[in-house]
Image (tube, rainbow, N blue to C red):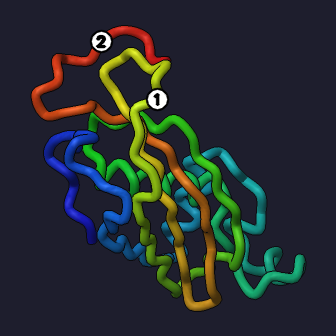
Amino acid sequence: MTALAPTTRTLDGITVGDVLPELPIPLTRTVIVATAIASRDYQDVHHDPGLAVERGSPDIFMNILSTNGFVGRYVTDWTGPGALIEKVAIRLGAPNHPGDTMVLTGTVTAVAVPPDRHDGRGVVEIALRGANSRGDHVTGTVRVALPLATDAPTLTGPLS
């Protein structure tokens, strides 16, 4: 399990090619059902095994909102509490079923300070993958805004 970053990472400490630590997510029946309910997704395929099988699935499966939440957690566990997620672009593949484990992995693919940005932050893009025993459950990218340097002043004001 990844350790939470105690402070927010800064752009000056990140380089393209940095690898995020793996985050295994045990896919229990409780996790799948509870995260569907928490996201107010009451679709029966996320909590009723019999109906999921009737609809062609071998069992219940995780919903996209839960996957998106785990992706956000994965990235912010690494970046720290002051990161701002600006964009999430994910694609689903193999379903997450109970009894399996999804392992999230990621790599920094871009680090930049856009010239039109004036809020004391730069951006980092992370390519990520969440795989289970069936293959890739989720792939995509996440862009986060981070302070430029450890000695940067307190960040305030609207984001660009």
In the rendered image, which residue does mark 2 sit on? 156
Query: Where is residue 45 shown, x and y percent of the image?
Result: 76, 68
Query: Where is residue 46 shown, x and y percent of the image?
Result: 69, 66
Name the outermost residue toward the left. Answer: 151
Secondary structure beneath label 1: loop
**Nearer the camera: disc 1 or disc 2:** 1
The relative height of residue 155 versus residue 59 in the rendered view (above or below) is: above
Instruction: Inspect the image, locate mark 2, and give the three-letter code of the amino acid beneath it.
Output: Thr
Q: Quadrant of residue 19?
A: bottom left
**Horizontal side of residue 77 vs 35, given as left or right:** left
Instruction: Inspect the image, locate mark 1, and give the three-letter code of the amino acid beneath it.
Output: Pro
The relative height of residue 79 versus residue 26 in the rendered view (above or below) is: above
Query: Where is residue 151 shown, x and y percent of the image?
Result: 10, 27
In the rendered image, which residue does mark 1 sit on? 114
> How many angstroms separate mark 1 from mark 2 (CA)?
18 Å
Is 109 in front, or is 69? 109
Identity of the residue drawn at 89% across and 76% down: 55
Report the number of numbered marks: 2
The relative height of residue 60 versus residue 76 in the rendered view (above or below) is: below
Indicate which disc, 1 or 2, sits on the residue closer to the N terminus: 1
